[in-house]
Image: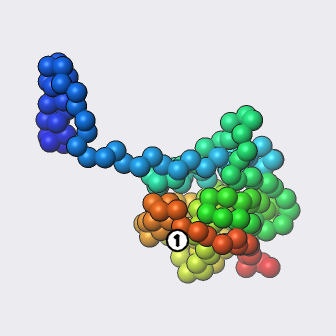
Amino acid sequence: MLLRRWAAALVAALALAGVQVVAATPAQAAARILYYDASQAQEFIAVVNQGAQIWNSAVANVQLQPVPAGRTPNIRVYADNGWPRTYSTSLGNGRWYMGREAVVDGYYPPRIAAHEFGHILGLPDNRTGLCTDLMSGSSAPVACKNAVPSAAEKAAVERLFRTSVTVAPQTYVWVGSAA
Ligand SMILES: [Zn+2]
């Protein structure tokens, strides 16, 4: 903090002196922006936005933003009466469904939304049964209300988006214990 303040003061002083300052360290690579379209998520639009915000707060190398008008989204989100599921086409691209089957069973909607976004971000299902794992999905108790990725899950997404790794198309289905 002190160092940063000192550096800022130095930059300001040099700027006053008319010296052009070039940052000594390269700026951190900009986050990759993925645009999502929640307009067809019906009653779940707010919870889809919540799922995106959870990831935006959790990682720096990728950010999920609502698609601007006229732009093709990376991710489309739908809702239907089946199980929540994701069809990813490549890292950061695909579509997912907010399935009412799980919501009716009592699974926590923000956890479902963040989980399905997690698949788009390259994470597979990891049925540990632990509520602290976001990607444990339906293997955690129905009462689990954790919608935040674990440190390991955050780190995995940061790693995937630090480089542009190739991720093969995948289908993931959230199947609850009532199935
Ligand atoms: Zn899943």
- Label 1, residues with CA under 10 Å away: few <14, some 14-19, many ≥20: many
Looking at the picture, tell me which residue is in the foreground, 144 or 24. 24
Q: Residue 106: in sight, yes or no?
A: no
CB at disc 1 and ligand 1 closer than 8 Å: no
Q: Is residue 44 left or right of residue 115?
A: right
Q: Quadrant of residue 134?
A: bottom right
Amino acid type, callout 1: Asp
Q: Is residue 19 left or right of residue 62?
A: left
Q: State which quarter of the image contains the N terminus.
A: top left
Q: Quadrant of residue 136?
A: bottom right
Q: Position of residue 139 (x, y in %)?
A: 63, 78
Q: Position of residue 35 (x, y in %)?
A: 65, 46
| Tally of numbered discs | 1
The way the protein has been coloured in the rendering is rainbow
Residue ID for mark 1: 133
Q: Position of residue 18 (x, y in %)?
A: 18, 19
Q: Is residue 107 above or below residue 63?
A: below
Query: Considering the numbered disc 1 on the image, is that residue within a helix, a strand or a loop?
Result: loop
